[in-house]
Amino acid sequence: MSAVDERPVGPATTPVAATMRALLDLPRAERREALEDLVAAEFKTVLLMTDEDDLPMDESYFDLGLTSLTITDLKQRLEDIIGAELSADLLFNSPTVGRLLDHICTELLPDVFRPGAAPGTPAAPPAGSTTDTTDTTDTTDAMLDEALKDLF
């Protein structure tokens, strides 16, 4: 058996599990800042920024220099870290790091960030929104996939 075969496998060894475990080990008040650090690090990596560079939280990804292709790559990287699917619609129509963090905290991982939420409790939909965004997300994802196929 090779050394690779002898490594433990399963949920406890995945990057998602490690990230979630690290977030859950923190006091709830410190979790958003820790998530912000993780997300900012991924953005800085893609943007070729140093750790010392400031990442504007309210500036459009496109104004920062990202393209649709790099955003798609970043989307996959962030999904791998948080273990949840990010909406391409959100990334392209509300393209700021701050809005992305708000979405992750309130919509994707509310039981990690919302005070008093029991694990597995879904977040309340934002005021004025519908609860079923499947068609919009599926359509946007399909359009994005088609555009990427055309590039390659």
Image: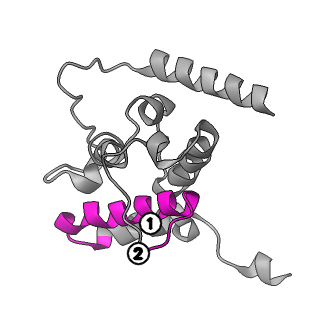
In this view, 144 is above or below 64 = above
Where does the N terminus fall, quadrant-wise?
bottom right
Q: How many numbered discs sit on the rendered protein?
A: 2
Instruction: Indicate the amino acid at tag 2.
Output: Glu
Specify the segment rendered in magenta.
25-52
User: Could you say which is closer to the camera, residue 136 or residue 46?
Assistant: 46
**Is disc 2 placed on a helix, strand or loop?**
loop
- Estimate how packed mark 2 is, as few (under 14), some (14 to 19) or many (20 or more) residues with alpha carbons within 10 Å: few
Give percent across and percent down for residue 49. Answer: 51, 66
- Residue 141 shows which numbered tag? none
Give percent across and percent down for residue 128. Answer: 19, 18
Check residue 35 for magenta coloring. yes
Earlier in the chain: of badge 1 and badge 2, it is 1
Q: Which residue in the structure is indicated by mark 1?
A: 19
Give the left or right position of residue 102, taking residue 65 as reference: left
In this view, 13 is above or below 131 = below
- Estimate how packed mark 1 is, as few (under 14), some (14 to 19) or many (20 or more) residues with alpha carbons within 10 Å: some
Rendering quarter of residue 127: top left
Furthest toward the right, the residue is 1
Residue at 71 percent across and 31 percent down: it is 148
